[in-house]
Structure formats: structure tokens, C-alpha cells
Image: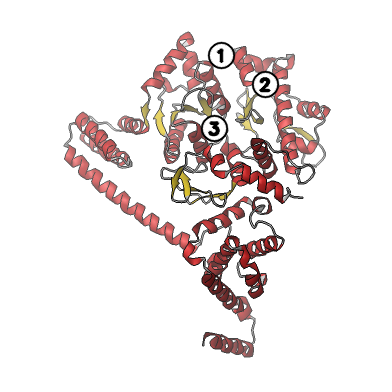
Amino acid sequence: MAFPESFLQELKMRNDITEVVSSYVNLKRRGRNMVGLCPFHGEKTPSFNVYTENGSFYCFGCGVGGDVISFEMKIENLDYVDAVKALAQRAGMDIPENSYDDSLSKLRNRVFEANREAARFYYSTLNSKSGAAGLAYFHSRGLSDRTIRHFGLGFADDNWTSLCSHLRSKGFKDNELVAANLAVQRRNGKGIYDRFTNRVMFPIIDLRGNVIAFGGRIMTNEKPKYLNTSDTPVFKKSANLFSLNNAKNSGTRTLILCEGYMDVIAVNQAGFTNAVATLGTALTSEQAVLMKRYADEVIICYDADEAGQKATARAIQILRNAGLLIRVLSIPSGKDPDEFIRSKGSDGPLAFKALLEKSGNDIEYRLQKLKQEHNIETTDGRVAFLEAASRVIATISSPIERDVYSSKICAELNVDKNAFKQQLSRLTSRANRDNRKQEIRKIQTDLSRRNDKINTDHYKKPRSSSAEEALVVYLVNNPDSAVEISSKLRPEQFQNSLIRRYYEYILNRINDGLDPLNNITADFSSDEASKLFQLMSQTISSVSTPQAMREYIEVINEESKKLSSDDISSMSPNQLMSYLEQMKKNKQ
């Protein structure tokens, strides 16, 4: 069962969408709407709209839309029931008992509880006789007992059933442990075994203090060196960061982005609590957007080896796209942050602080790398460096910033600035042409809806789909028209299967005296709900009149009488001639 309609209406009324969104997004008024930078993807120009009149939001950049419940679900990574509970708590409302299906919410809570108990078990094991090897490893890496305790580090012994046996004794069921990815189902289907064995353990904690996953490092040269929790009902590795729960309270809007758990912990122990790391994957745009919520600047602090440098180059673009300022820390002698700090002994924190203060922005870093790659003492090397440097500087959007770097390079290499600026001008002109072509191709693709993975029928039948979409939006905005529309149009006449589902759903709710969209987030998938809000956001008022409504109905009726290519191919010659004659009469 769903939540009672009256409860949801009051919930939304007491959780004004503008106020809820404003706690995450800096909104500004634009006409009747509020706009801001989207919290779900990186952007520099605001495309995130909040519609205060109907309590919805839609981002024209990434296509995410919905009501205040779906916003809470996405921004806090919650399921539907937990999002409703969070909003109810925010408004001081009581949840109606036994009125909804909370099976997924219950499973999520059990996974949280299993993870918390597993973290306690791993920590206890680390400080027992069977965890001596793990504790010795952490001490050998320079970690104090205080740091070990602060991060809740632990140890998974080499017994393949230790954790499973412990958690079973605490009342957890096998399916709950598999769902948490703490255990793995045996291939024969008979029983489970521990996912992590003989590894030092790093609990991953979310922003609300829940243990959501684990990383485990083996202490030998076996592969894989790190084993991480796979995605679960409470964890998505591409959308979380290690130690962000600590970094968000560091008192600074700068984050230090490290490669791994040990680097973060070493940097943290040295006094820099604003360090975070990705979770066994390369940096994702989701993680960059998450960082943008808590920082204005990110200092990339990856390993100095070749893999680390490639990861740095990739991270620069992702962080820039998220609208973050970037600096890159270069560690001498090819060391990683953990090694560097330990190598300096008691001076490690001061030495690392000095590196942070000397770190240049991403443009300076890339130009320095180019200098290392080219011998600027030779003519060919100077030319190659200048051409490569011009390509880097051409990516800078600010003309003033471009001029500063151009002047600096030309002065260092004693090169005529006008010649360098001509090269830059050619590159920026070419880039602008390429960008315009890409924009045109994107517009053409968007208009054709060729790549629409949710509303797949639109590309196949654009005329009927366009009329059906516009009619559904009209019906949502004008529920009093339901009687007239339903008397002239049956659901089976709709050619687009998704829009037909919207039509039937909205008609039924209106006929039952309910708000058309009050429960849309629960009754459709998040992508399907977003698609409906997209259609509502893109429909202009001039095509939402009674006359337009009747024209949509006429088009849908016409298109519903047309046969598909499969139908036509199966006709007999006489049937085909009869059908063509009928089509001619309809056009007259």
C-alpha cells in the first residue's frame, strides 16, 4: 500500500520545495521560477529550475526532474519510503503506521545494522590475538592507535566464516549479509562465506555516520591488492568518497583528493582533515559534483608515478566540468603522500604543508609537465613545447587568464607575443567551430529524440507522440478537461506506450478525485517520473489552450487509424487497396 493521499499532500505543503532545495542549492529568481546550478551534474551556467507553483523541479542540463520527494531521494541517496520519512521528520510529522510497503527500507536498515556490527567485529579482531598481523601492518605504516581508533580500522582473519558466524549469532539472516556484500553465496547455492579474509579493513562511512561499505587491503603481494564492497542497497561506489564525513567538518572549502585509503589516513594524521579518496574506481562526475557541494577548490594529490599522472590529467577535466577550482600537488622523488610524510619523520606535517602551499593550479601543472617532456634548449623542442602549450592555454575560457599565461611563456622563452597570440587565435577559432558543430548535432539529436532511452517510441512515431505528450501535459494542468478528453480518446489509441501509461494513470487519479501527480514518484520509476516533469517543463503556454487540446485529439485519432509497416506487409492485395482508398478519403 502507498502512503495516504492526505498525508502526502500535507507533507509536500509543509516541505516547500524551494526551501528544501535551497538548503543544497543557491537559488535565484528568474521570472516565476527559481534557478541555480544543478546539484546532480557539473555545470557553470544554471540550468536547474524549481517551479514553486506546482512544487516540482527540472534540470535542462541532465534531465533530472520530480517533486520534493524525488529531490530528497536523489540528493540524499534514499529510497522512496526513507525520503518520505526524512521529510516528515523535517516537518515534525508522524508517519502513518502500516500504510505503506517498507520492505526495501527495512532491508536498507538491516544492511546498515549489519555493516555497523561488521565494523565492530573487524575492529575487535584487529585488537585480538588473531589480528596481530593486521595491527603490526598498520603500525609499520606509521599509524597511531588513536588514528586506528578514529577511522575504525579493523582486520578480517583468514577464516572464511568468522564474520558470517558472528553476524548470524546477532540475528542477521544470510540474505541480509549477501545484500550487504559482507558475504558471498556459494556456487552450489548451499550456504555463504565471508567476502573479506586476511585483509586489513577500512570502513566507509557516509555523511550521516552510517557504515555503508568496506575496503580491504591484503598484506601480501597477492592480487587484487584492494577488495571493495560492490554496490548494495545503501552504497554506490561511483557516488561516494572515503572520509568525506570527516572532511566536511574540517572548516575549509578546500578538499585534498588522494588516490587511496592509506594516503587519506596519513594526511589526516598529519593534521589535514580535509582529505578524501575515491573508492576503488577512477574519479567520476558524480563524485566531483558531490565535492562541489562541500568545496570550492580541490587539490589533486595523486601518486607521482605514471598511473598517478594519467589519473591526474583525467581528474582535472572532470573537476573543471563540475565548476571547481583545481590545484595539483607535486610530490618529489616519485613518492605518494603517505610515503612522503613518513620519510620526513616528525617534520612530515610541515613538509607536506609546504607542498600544499606551493601547489599550482591545473594550467600551471600541465605547462610544467610539458616543459619536462620537451627540451626547450633546442629549436625543435621549443617549437614543440610552444605548440603544445598553446593548445593548453586555448582551453582557458577567460581572455584575461589566457593573456597572463601567454605573456609569461613568451617572456620565459623570449618569443614574440603577437605570433603566439595568432596561434592561440587559430586554435580558439577552430575550437569554437567544433563546439558549434557539436552543439548543432546535439540539438538535432535532441529534437529527433533518437537517443531517448526512456521515451523510446517518440523517435519511431514523432507526430502522434508529440500530440500525445502535449495532451498529457494539458490534462495534468487542466484536470477539469478529463471528461471531454476521455469521451473522445481511448487509451488504446495512443501509439506511444509510455505516454499511454501516463494518460491512463492521470485519468484514473482525476476520476478518483485525486491530485494527478501527488504519488507519481512512488508509482513510476525515477527516470519515468523525470521524463513527465521534463515534458511539463518544455511545454509552452501557447500550445496549452482548449483549441490546441482538440487539435491534439484530432492528430491522435488520425494517427491511431494508420497501420504499422508490419500490419501492411501482412495484408492481401485487396485489403491493401481498400486501406489506401480509405486513407485518401480521410485526407479529402
Give the answer, above or below, for where 462 lies relative to 318. Answer: below
Three-letter amino acid code at disc 2?
Answer: Gly
Q: Residues within 10 Å of mark 1 (few under 14, many from 20)?
A: some
Q: Which residue is mark 1?
A: 142
Query: Label 1 to label 3, Cα distance in Å?
Result: 22 Å
Q: Which mark is residue 461?
A: none
Secondary structure state at the residue bearing disc 1: loop
Camera sees residue 392: yes
Give the answer, above or below, for where 455 lies relative to 576. Answer: above
Which tag, 1 or 3, sits closer to the chain's start? 1
Q: Which mark is residue 154?
A: 2
Left-right relation of 296 to 494 = left
Q: Which mark is residue 278?
A: 3
The picture places residue 435, in percent across and down from the top left corner, at 36, 52
Which tag, 2 or 3, sits closer to the chain's start? 2
Q: In this orientation, which residue lies closer to the viewer: 382 or 149? A: 149
Q: In this orientation, which residue lies closer to the viewer: 545 or 411? A: 545
Contact between labelled residues 3 and 2, with CB atoms less than 8 Å apart: no
Three-letter amino acid code at disc 1?
Answer: Gly
The picture places residue 341, in percent across and down from the top left corner, at 48, 16
Secondary structure state at the residue bearing disc 3: loop
The picture places residue 377, in percent across and down from the top left corner, at 22, 29
